[in-house]
Image (spheres, helix red, strand yellow):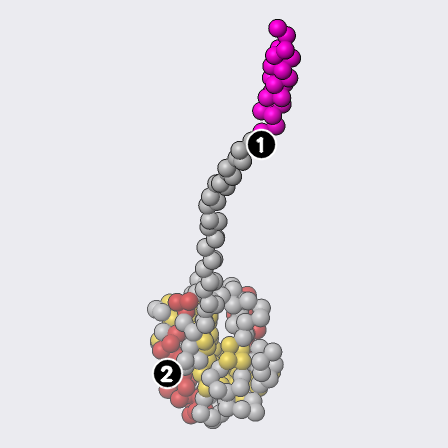
Amino acid sequence: MTYFKPLLFVGLIVGLTLGGCRRRPAEAPVAAAPTAPIASSPKPPEPPPPPKCESLSEGCTADAQTQQPIAETGLWVQPPTGWHYATEAAGPVSFHATESAALAWVAARGTQPDDVFAALPALMTRLEVAQVKTDVLRRRLGKPDSRVEARGAKVRLWEVSKATQKPAQPTMKGRPGTLLVIAAEHDGPPVVGLAFVLEGSTPELAAEVMKAVQTLGGKL
């Protein structure tokens, strides 16, 4: 009989069709791979504060803009460029890199010879100056060897050398040379300074000292 054969064929087609239309089961979502936290870069260290230049141990070197106040006198001075310097409590000081020359300053109590003389012991101690005939020097302080005009002060100068106090020659740290006593007057408290240049130094070094002396004045 052929009755069932067509039905079987039709049933087979329908079954295949229905089977092909079945909905596929939903796929489970794929979990995202965990991301590693981004490490923040360490904060750069703060730069060290600039030196106060209150001690020579800080290694400050003067440039063309360096100025040092001289206590509470209202006067400032520019140390020679390239010299080591410090603004110490007693007053500013500066040394050539080879220590072949030096400068130091203090406030003075007055402008008379005795006032200038009274300021010298502390300066000589600071620069380690010796072999100075103080009695001879004291008598000379009434009349300066020379005068110069600074930027804001009138300056008197006295040179102390073997020629001025024979036979002794001034020394700085045990080395012979020439001493320069400086007294500066202006509208405020006076200032006394001391400079030393070692024997055998070039004339340019003495010129650097004089240039520094002539920078005495108010702050630029």
- 202 or 69: nearer the viewer: 69
User: Looking at the figure, which quarter contains the C terminus?
Assistant: bottom right
Residue 7 falls within the magenta-colored stretch: yes
* Disc 1 target residue: 23
Q: Quadrant of the N terminus?
A: top right
Q: How many marks?
A: 2
Q: Amino acid at mark 1?
A: Arg
Q: Please, what is the three-letter code of the amino acid marked with disc 2?
A: Pro
Residue 34 in view here: yes
The magenta region covers: 1-22
- The image shows residue 22, relative to residue 161, as above or below, that is above
Q: Give the Cα separation between the discs numbered 2 and 1.
A: 109 Å
Q: Are marks 2 and 1 in contact (CB under 8 Å)?
A: no
155 to 203, vertically: above or below: below
Name the residue located 47 percent from the left edge and 58 percent from the top edge: 43
Judge left or right: residue 93 versus residue 1: left
Residue at 58%, 70% (x, y): give it. 65
In this orientation, which residue lies closer to the viewer: 117 or 74? 74
Q: Which residue is mark 2?
A: 121
Does 126 appear in magenta?
Answer: no
Residue 161 seen anywhere in this rendered image of the structure: no
Closer mark to the observer between disc 2 and disc 1: 1
Q: Position of residue 120 (x, y in %)?
A: 40, 83
Tell me the crowding category of disc 2: few under 14, some 14 to 19, or many 20 or more residues within 10 angstroms, Cα based: few
